[in-house]
Structures are given as C-alpha cells and as structure tokens.
Image: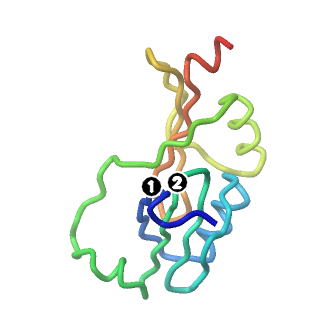
Amino acid sequence: MATLREFVSVRYLVSDVEEAVDFYITRLDFTLRTNAAPAFADVVRGSLRLLLSGPASSGYRATPAGIGKGGNRIHLVVDDLDEEIRRLAAAGIEFSSDVISGPGGRQILLADPAGNLIELFQSRMMREN
C-alpha cells in the first residue's frame, strides 16, 4: 500500500461517513483505505486520497461554524464522459450542471450525499485519440 506522502489528500466533511464511503466506492470506483466510521474513513482513487470526516471526527470539529461552502471540488478525469453520465444516471445520480465544453475538454458536476461537488472531466486530447 502507498504511503501517505504518495497521495494528494482532500478532506470532505460529510454528515454520514458510511453513506459517503458507499457512494464513492460503488459510484466512482474508489477503494476503501481506512474505515473508522462513524467518525472517519478514507478512500483512494489513483493518487487521490479522499478523507471523509463525519461530525464525530477531529477534522470535522476543527472547522469553524459559519464557514461558507466554496465552489471547490475534486476533479476526476474519465475516458468517456458520455458513458460515465449514462452509467451514473442509470444508477439514479442527479447532476448539478449540464455538460460544459471548454478549450481543454468537457465536464459535468455532481454532488456526493453530503453536497460536496465532484467534477467529471474528459480531456479534449482523450476525445481526439
């Protein structure tokens, strides 16, 4: 197993750790690394380590009340955006945006059960190959 320094880690505050773990594993192909639910779990996908911190965790409690949500999100590169959209929609996932195209590629947003944003992105170079 990779060491912590080999991951890029992002902390997401979630209301239900077990629900979040299930979402990331079954819907977005993450792998469970540590499960200390209901307080905390971490899941990995490639070099991304997602720290899922529930209300009982120190990471959650360290966040001052009243801090607003930003537009930040994790960015997951996919080979075929249209296929991912079909697969997730068939599983009952609702999207938070339409597909947006730009000079670098195409993207769409969805949210995890706690409302944290996730961007699925297909590079223009992947579409041309």
Reading the image, the residue beneath label 1 is 8
Mark 2 element type: strand
Looking at the picture, the colour scheme in use is: rainbow
Hey, which quadrant is residue 27 in on the image?
bottom right
Quarter containing the C terminus: top right
Check whether the beta carbons of the residues at disc 2 and disc 1 lie within 8 A of each other.
Answer: yes
Q: Amino acid at mark 2?
A: Leu
Dot 1 amino acid type: Val
Q: What is the crowding at mark 2: few (fewer than 14 residues within 10 Å), some, or many (at least 20)?
A: some
User: In which quadrant of the rendered image does the N terminus lie?
Assistant: bottom right
The structure residue drawn at horizontal position 66% and vertical position 58%, both measured from the top left corner, is: 30
Q: Is residue 49 left or right of residue 91?
A: left
Disc on res. 63: none
Q: CA distance from mark 2 to mark 1?
A: 5 Å
| Residue at image mark 2 | 48
Q: Quick check: 45 above or below 12?
A: above
Report the residue at 50% width, 85% height from top.
39
Rendering coords of residue 110 (x, y %)? 54, 46
Q: Residues within 10 Å of mark 1 (few under 14, many from 20)?
A: few
Front residue of 124/94: it is 124
* Residue 78 coordinates in the image, percent (x, y): 63, 35
Of callouts 2 and 1, which one flags the residue occurring earlier in the amino acid sequence?
1
Label 1 element class = strand
Q: Quadrant of residue 45?
A: bottom right
Residue 42 location (% of width, % of height): 55, 70
